[in-house]
Structures are given as C-alpha cells and as structure tokens.
Amino acid sequence: MRNLVRFLKRYSHIFLFIFLEGIAIYIISQNSFYQASAITSFANQIAGKVNARTYNITKYFTYGSSNEALVKENAKLRAMIETSYVKYQHKAFQYNDTIYKQQFEYIDAKVIQKTISKRNNYFMLNKGRLHGVTNNMGVISPSGIVGVIVNVSDNFSLVMSVLHQDSRPNIKNQRTKISGTLVWEGGDYTSGKLVDIPSSIPLKIGDTIITSGFSQDFPEGIMVGKIKKFDKDKGTGFYVVDIKFAVDYNKLEYVYIVKNFFKEEQIQLTKDIKNE
Amino acid sequence: MNKDILLGFLHFVLIAAFQVFILNGLNIFGYFNPMIYVWFILMLPTNTPKWLGLILAFLMGFTIDIFAGQVGFHAAALTLIALIRPLFITIFFSGKDIETNLRPSIAEMSLSTYLPYITSLVFIHHFTYFTIEIFNFSEFFLTLLRIICSTIITTLLILLCDYLFIHKRKI
C-alpha cells in the first residue's frame, strides 16, 4: 500500500499530463471535421469581439485597396441597371414577371479574422445566426469564390475557405463547359489545382475557370481563377491543372454570403432517391 | 517568489499578445509559421514544479487556440513540451545550472548549451503540432518542409527576443 502511494506521488505529474492531454484530444476529436464547434461557439463570441476591435484599428491601413475594389464593383453594377441599356423592343423587358423566380440572395459581411498560411484555413465573418446565416451557405467576394460556412454563432460565422483540404467545390471551364473539382494542396495561397478534368478535350493557358452551379452552395458563373499551367497525367487520362486564384485571399475584406432559396428542395430530391 | 509570479504573469500576457496579434497574421511564403509562445515554457526556471509547468503549458496553448479559432492543437503540443522539458534540461545543462534555479536564457549560459536546448524542443513542438493539425501522411514531405522552416524561424525569433529583452539577473 505504501509502495502504491509512493508510486502515485512520484508519477503524479504523468497523470496530470495524461489528464490535460486527454482534454485537448477530446476537444480536437469532438471538432475534428469542422474543428470549431461546441466550445468555440462560446469562445468565438469572446475572440470575435476582440478581433472586431483589432479589425477596427487595422482597417484604416487597407482602406485604399478595398475602396478601389468597391468602386470597381459599383461600376460593374451600374453597367447592369436598367438605365444602362437601350430598349430596342419594349416587350423584351418584363418586371414583376411570373417566369423568373429569385433563387439567390446575398448577405454582405466583413472578414474580421483570417488565416492563409496554415494547411487548413478559415475566415471569421461579422454576421451570424441573427442575420440569417446558417451552416453550408456559400461565400463569395466581389472578385470570386471564397468558401463555405461551417460554424455559426449568434453574431459571427466561420468560413472554411477554398484553402482547406476538405474544400472541393465543383468548377467548370467557361470556354469548353467541361467540369472538374478544385482542390488546394497547401503552400502558396495564390494558386490551386484542378482535378477530374478529362484530357481528351484540349485546354488553353489563360482559360477562365468559374463555378459550375452543380452544388447548391454557389450560383453558376462565380469567378475561380485562370489556368496557369497544365499537364496530362498519363496513367489516368485526366489533366493536372494549376490555376491562379482570381481572389487575393490575403487582402480579402468584404464578402457576400449566398442564400439559396431552393436548397432544401434540391437536397430533398437527392435524399428521396437514396431512401428508395 | 512573488516577483517570479508577477514576472511569469507578465511574460504570459506579453508573449500571448505578440503571438495572437502579430505573428498569427503573418504569412511568409506559406511555410514559415513562427510560434514564439513555446518560449514561455522554455524560459520557466529549471526547478519549476512539474505539475505547474504542465498547467501553465495547457493554459498558454488553450489561450492561443481560442484566438486562432482552432481548438486543442496548440494546447496538446505545448503540454507535451512541458512534460519532456525536465528530461532535456538534465541532458543539456550542467548540474550546477539545475541546482541554482536559473531561467534558461542566453544571458545565463553559453550559446552552445542554449541553442541545442531550444532547437530540439521547438522542433518536437512543431512536429507534434503540424502532425496533429494536418493529420494526413499523404503530404509527408510538404509537412516536413513546413516543420523545418517553422522551426528555423521560431528559433531565430526566440534568440532575438532573448537577446533584446532578457538580462542577467543580479544576485
């Protein structure tokens, strides 16, 4: 008995170590896929507030470039409004019509925290459940694709960016309409890789890559990037393509969260088949 | 003794703030991720009780985790460092150093003793951290490159801060 007590006393720090490490591993395993969930929803509230404060200070340094981006977007939108078009035929423009139904809505948000240097990168946005954000919504920026919402607290939300090993958005080539998958293999945050593109159809350097619209998260035609380099993989009959992202993720500041009104319906449709 | 606690608290806050507000926002070629918060455990006095070292390491790691928007990774890696640190102290330091309860720093010992001590522990920390974070052996060599680059930058940063801010204790 005395030996047992002595043993416990001598190795007490080992037990403490196992206990603490157990807590850490338990937390990681509880959140292994989305890495931030139950416990971080609470912690995000605090960290989010601190980060929002820091952002308030640092945003002054980036006003220049973000203004420029906003002005560009304004110009683009202005080009699309009714007054920018000449009406050749009055019947061609119909408003309040019953043919078109709105499918996508956009919620604007600011990035208040981001990482780009890790293997798996996340952005935190200043809009949360109270603003109508839910999990699995797509996120885009004025210049292109950003990621998918993976965790939401009342006032903040966490985006799994395309710079993540679990991010696999569906994309297509604007010219040839052939679709594939975008992956990111770490390292350089300005370039990504395309896989699953059959090598039977020729590609060109500089081809524009856009979202395919096959997944429910993103509308069709959101910019992804441009082809930088491609090789044929002889074994598989697929291309290995390097692209340059359209978005500079390091400077990312204003984004839009995409709300798809038909998402439930689309998911239900696939579910119905699986149940049979 | 009170002075030690106060100094320790000050180090905790300053190092955590430096890591969270400056280094976490830094990106150098995508492969260099400086993690200076390891220094907080490395600089604890040599006869700090083991349980205290472990708890401090867990708290420090957890603080960094929360602000980095991740959970548990930094805490797990740093707690391991606190466990094996006493072993490395007996390997690298002379018996006299251990008895006098010194804070490991470049002012107290020669570079040839100090450098292997921090490099090896920083390497083990980064190895653990990146292995847990990436959790995928298919990119083993990229991960190894990331570990080595980060070890170099963290070690250099620790040496620099040590040289600038830590002075020899007057006895």
Image: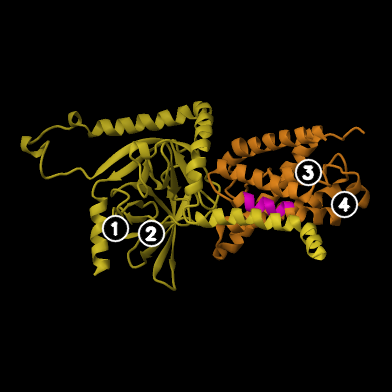
Chain colours: A yellow, B orange
Tag 2's secondary structure? Answer: strand
Which image quadrant: the N terminus of chain B? top right
Where is residue B163? Give x, y as percent. Answer: 80, 37
Asked if residue B12 shows in the view, the reply is yes
> Is residue B120 shown above or below B162?
below
Residue occupying image coordinates x 25% and y 32%: A79
Q: Dot 2 corresponds to which residue? A: A181
Which amino acid, by three-letter code, is at mark 2? Thr
Residue A176 got which mark? 1
Number of the front mark, 3 or 2: 3
Quadrant of residue A230 within the rendered picture: bottom left
Tag 1's secondary structure? Answer: loop
Tag 4's secondary structure? Answer: loop
Which amino acid, by three-letter code, is at mark 4? Phe
Q: Is there CB contact under 8 Å for labels 4 and 2?
A: no
Q: Dot 3 corresponds to which residue? A: B44
Where is residue A150? Give x, y as percent. Answer: 42, 49
